[in-house]
Structures are given as structure tokens and as C-alpha cells.
Image (spheres, rainbow, N blue to C red):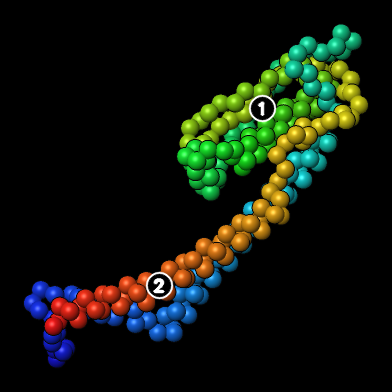
Amino acid sequence: MSGPESDLPPGFAWLEILEDLGNGDDLDISLWLGGVLAALLFNAAVLLLGAWLERRHDRRLLDMEAAMASVRVFTGRPPLDVVGKPQLVQAAIVMAPAPLGRLMLLIRRIIGGRVVTRQRDMQRTRRLALLRLREQAHGLGAGVLAGVDICQIGLGRGRFAMLATGTALVGAEPGPLPQVTEAIGAEPPRRRREIVIALAALVLAAAATAEMDYLVDTYFGNFWKRWVFHIKE
């Protein structure tokens, strides 16, 4: 049993699809808004989870740095009264940015400005490489690290490695806890204000998407229908 014949001219039967454009019912609108809301909630959850994991990682890094703070670090020669058996130590940390961080880096390359996320990752990687160096020295029984040097090696596609080297003086006495740690001057984790701004941007993007969909269904749909009716005539 064949369907109703089209009253469009030969070769224009495919335009029947456009006649239904803009005739969406309340169910279609509800499904669309539900999808937009689900995407908004998913992105907000990912953003909040990432901020929580970042803060937890920074707290753990501070605790580990405090545990190894007694190992004195010198970029050059140690004081003359420091005596110990020299032992070469090294540590390497590789950092690969997240897809969102890579996108922010690409945008900043186009419009310019500081990439705070990139700087935060580099500082955190540098601190972690120095921490691993101190842990090796502490494991050897050395309280002093001399000739410490940290080198950054680019690996392409936003990835880089921090290579830290130094000479551990085994048997040297550790010093008192420093008053200034490596965390001083580092970029702080994402503030709550930044998270609120990002969530507001997600809400605005969802609202703009819903409004654009309404405009397309209302105006463009009517335009297509009038065009189809004109061809029928």
C-alpha cells in the first residue's frame, strides 16, 4: 500500500522533509532542554571534581614537602663546614596537559596573555621533581643536596619533562626547617571565584543554545515552509 502522493513538482519531493521544520511540539522542546540540562550538569560535575582533585593534590604535595624540608638544597657548592660522601641523584617528572588545558593553550597562542593553568602545571611539576630528589637523598642518609639543577625538556604537543639532578652528601647533617618553602610564589589552585565564573559561563552557553534552537525552529522553519509552499504553487 503506497502512501499519499506528493503535490510538489517532479524532483522536489525531498522538500517535504522541510515542511515539518519548525513544527516541534512540547515533547521535542522538553527533550531538547533535558539534553541541554544534562550536558550542563555533567560539565559542572567535571569542573567541580577537577577543582577538588587539584586542591587535594596540592595539599598532599605540601605535606610531602614539609616531611622532606630538612634536606638542605644548594644550587652551587655547599658551605665549607658541610662534609659527606658525594652521590649523584636525579629525578624526572613528565607532565602532559589535559585536553581542556591544551585548548586553553591554543586559544592563548591566538589572542595572547598568560596561561595560568600552564604555569601552575609547570610549577607543580618542578616542585615534584625537587621533592623526588630530596626523597632520594633522604633515603641515602644525606642531609644536604649540592649543585642542584632543574632542566625543562619539551616533548611536543604541550608535554614536557622536568629533569632534576644534584649531588647528595651522604652523612651530612640536615639543617633546620626552612622559613620559605618551594610553595612560596607558586600559582595557587583554582579559586572559588574562577569556578563560579566557569559555571556561569556554562549556564549562559546552555541558555544561548536553547534560545538559538528556538529561533531556528521559529523563523528558519517558517522560512523553509513558505519556500516549499511557493514551489507548490
| 174 sits to left or right of 159 | right
For discs 1 and 2, the disc positioned in front in the rendered view = 2
| 63 sits to left or right of 37 | right
Viewer-side residue, 88 vs 40: 40
Q: Earlier in the sequence, mark 1 or mark 2?
A: 1
Q: Is residue 205 above or below residue 222?
A: above
Looking at the image, the residue that sits furthest to the left is 10
Q: How many residues crowd around disc 1 within 10 Å: few (fewer than 14), some, or many (20 or more)?
A: some
Which residue is the site of mark 1?
91
Helix, strand or loop status at disc 1: strand
Residue 153 marker: none
Helix, strand or loop status at disc 2: helix
Residue 56, can we see it? yes
Q: Quadrant of residue 228?
A: bottom left
Which residue is the site of mark 2?
215
| 196 sits to left or right of 22 | right
Which quadrant is home to the N terminus?
bottom left
Check if mark 1's residue and mark 2's residue have beta carbons within 8 Å: no
Q: Is residue 40 above or below residue 180?
A: below
Q: Amino acid at mark 2?
A: Leu
Q: Quadrant of residue 117?
A: top right
> In x, y percent, where is residue 48?
65, 58
Residue at the (87%, 28%) spot, across then down: 178
| 39 sits to left or right of 141 | left
Residue at the (19%, 81%) spot, across then down: 229
Viewer-side residue, 63 vs 196: 196
Residue at the (71%, 50%) spot, across then down: 191
- Tell me the CA gap for discs 1 and 2: 58 Å
Q: Quadrant of residue 146?
A: top right
> In x, y percent, where is residue 173?
89, 20
Viewer-side residue, 140 vs 69: 69
> In x, y percent, where is residue 71?
83, 26
